[in-house]
Image (cartoon, rainbow, N blue to C red):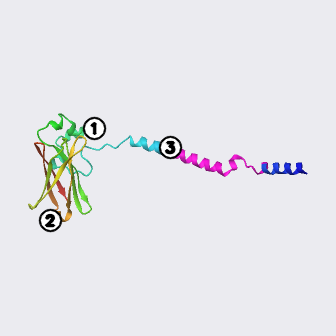
């Protein structure tokens, strides 16, 4: 009788054991492996596409070019380069080291409405550790708004800390001339531009 009971227990335990593909942990592991493979694929595909960065022109997005920049002094050469697909290097890298120039040079890198303010940011081609920037906005009817900000050094260039002009101060006119006078380390320079609201 004991033999019969032992055989029956052995038979019942063997019959209850499911094949590996029918066990729940098999499916849990399978789903986990599939998620890992998909995750690795997405990471590899995104890093591959980020290496193909979109190249922009000399002006930064949102920059307000002056009338001569918008027209282009070398527009025939620029048209030829655009037609042939040649890239132009930014003027700040052409020629001599900008840090050795006698005057401060740069450009307005951002000029746009942001909520209740008009923001103006600029890039100074030289590396300056100290100095000041004085913004003068002149309307068509002669109204002048002035703001000052300190010069802030970046890795190889500099910038002004930034100008945030409340839109309420600009409500008297739709068109303004930007003039930013920079003085730092025995050098001076002026960066100009336009605002159209």
Q: Secondary structure at mark 1?
A: loop
In the picture of the structure, the residue carrying the numbered disc 2 is: 172
**In the picture shown, does residue 105 fall above or below 193?**
above
Residue 80 rendering spot, x and y as whole percentages: 24, 38
Which numbered tag is attached to residue 40?
3
Residue appearing at x 16%, y 49% in the figure: 67
Label 1 CA crowd tier, 10 Å (few <14, some 14–19, many 20+): few
Which numbered tag is attached to residue 39?
none
Q: Is residue 25 magenta?
A: yes
Residue 138 rendering spot, x and y as whole percentages: 11, 58
Residue sticking out furthest to the top: 96
Residue stretch rendered in magenta on the structure? 14-39
Residue 153 rendering spot, x and y as whole percentages: 22, 45
Residue 3 rendering spot, x and y as whole percentages: 89, 48
Q: Nearer the viewer, residue 158 or 166?
A: 158
Does label 1 or label 2 sit earlier along the sequence?
A: 1
Does label 3 or label 2 sit earlier along the sequence?
A: 3
In the picture of the structure, the residue carrying the numbered disc 1 is: 87
Does label 3 or label 1 sit earlier along the sequence?
A: 3
Q: Secondary structure at mark 2?
A: loop
Residue appearing at x 61%, y 50% in the figure: 28
Dominant SS in magenta: helix
Label 2 CA crowd tier, 10 Å (few <14, some 14–19, many 20+): few
């Amino acid at each position: 009788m004991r033999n019969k009971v032992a055989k029956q227990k052995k038979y019942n335990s063997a019959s209850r054991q499911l094949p590996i593909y029918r066990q729940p942990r098999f499916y849990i592991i399978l789903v986990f492996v599939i998620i890992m493979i998909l995750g690795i694929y997405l990471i590899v595909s995104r890093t591959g596409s980020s290496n193909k960065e979109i190249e922009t022109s000399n002006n930064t997005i949102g920059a307000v070019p002056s009338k001569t920049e918008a027209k282009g002094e070398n527009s025939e050469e620029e048209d030829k380069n655009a037609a042939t697909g040649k890239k132009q290097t930014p003027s700040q890298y052409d020629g001599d080291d900008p840090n050795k120039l006698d005057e401060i040079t740069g450009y307005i890198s951002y000029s746009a409405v942001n909520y209740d303010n008009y923001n103006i940011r600029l890039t100074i081609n030289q590396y300056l550790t100290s100095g000041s920037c004085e913004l003068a906005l002149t309307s068509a009817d002669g109204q002048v708004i002035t703001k000052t900000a300190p010069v802030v050094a970046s890795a190889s260039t500099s910038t002004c800390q930034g100008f945030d002009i409340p839109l309420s101060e600009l409500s008297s006119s739709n068109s303004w001339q930007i003039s930013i006078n920079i003085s730092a380390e025995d050098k001076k320079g002026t960066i100009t531009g336009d605002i159209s609201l």
